[in-house]
Image (cartoon, rainbow, N blue to C red):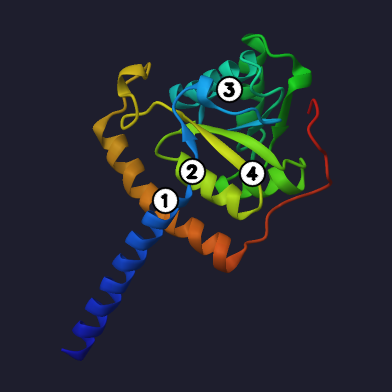
Amino acid sequence: MVGLVAVSGLALLGLVLLVAANVFVLKSGTPRYDSVEQVPHRPVAIVFGAGIEGDQPSPALAGRLDAAIELYQAGTVPHVLVTGDNHIASYDEVTVMRSYLMDHGLPSSAITRDYAGFNTYDSCARARDVFGVRAAVLVTQDYHLPRALFTCQHLGIDVVGLAVPDWQHHPDQVGFTWPASMQRALTIREWGARLKAVVETDVLHPRVTLGPYLGLADT
């Protein structure tokens, strides 16, 4: 009986922490904008990786890149930092992202690749410490944007967010269907990831793969 009470108490505490962390991140992860016209000028847009299919971005990633292209064309940002996974030679998110941007009119000089953006915390920390980013527009889907804003802000970067449509944010504007199973999986994952973000930024401060300072350049 005592053991059952202890387990129940721990489970309740875990649930309380999970809910509290999510509320904290959602309230802290602002300002978020719905359209390019609303976004204030920043020196760079940060586009987070979201998977590739061969030499093409996934539909979700293409949505992020299209939004960054709009920001650049509107003069809201003069530079784009693409950050993603290149942990093996055969999987290079950021080169696919760069190629997509260039195919849509951005010059190579306006694009920087971060090959070691393995997760949101790494991307934000490397943006600050490797690429010298002090202010930025974060470009990602609405479900992910509060956590990205929260993380960058807690690392001292002045950020605003452009919410790319997903199943919960202007779904009528999405160019592909988000399957119900994907929606559920991403929602559950994001709840846990928000708790992880609070622990990382306020408690653990995990070590990030950095390397030499590069600044924003054609890389």
Residue where numbered disc 2 is placed: 30
Q: Is residue 96 visible?
A: yes
Q: Nearer the viewer, mark 3 or mark 2?
A: 2
Please tell me which residue lies in front, 156 or 196: 156
- Packing grade of label 4 (10 A; few <14, some 14-19, many >=20) is some
Residue where numbered disc 4 is placed: 158
Query: Considering only order in the chain, which callout, 1 or 3, is on the residue closer to the N terminus?
Result: 1
Q: Residue at x 69, y 42 (%)?
A: 127
Between the C-alphas of marks 2 and 1, the distance is 7 Å
- Packing grade of label 2 (10 A; few <14, some 14-19, many >=20) is some
Q: Residue at x 52, y 35 (%)?
A: 161
Please tell me which residue lies in front, 28 or 148: 28
Q: Nearer the viewer, mark 3 or mark 1?
A: 1
Q: Mark 2 belongs to which amino acid?
A: Thr
Please tell me which residue lies in front, 117 or 169: 169
CB of mark 3 within 8 Å of CB of mark 1?
A: no
Q: Mark 4 belongs to which amino acid?
A: Asp
Between the C-alphas of marks 2 and 4, the distance is 11 Å
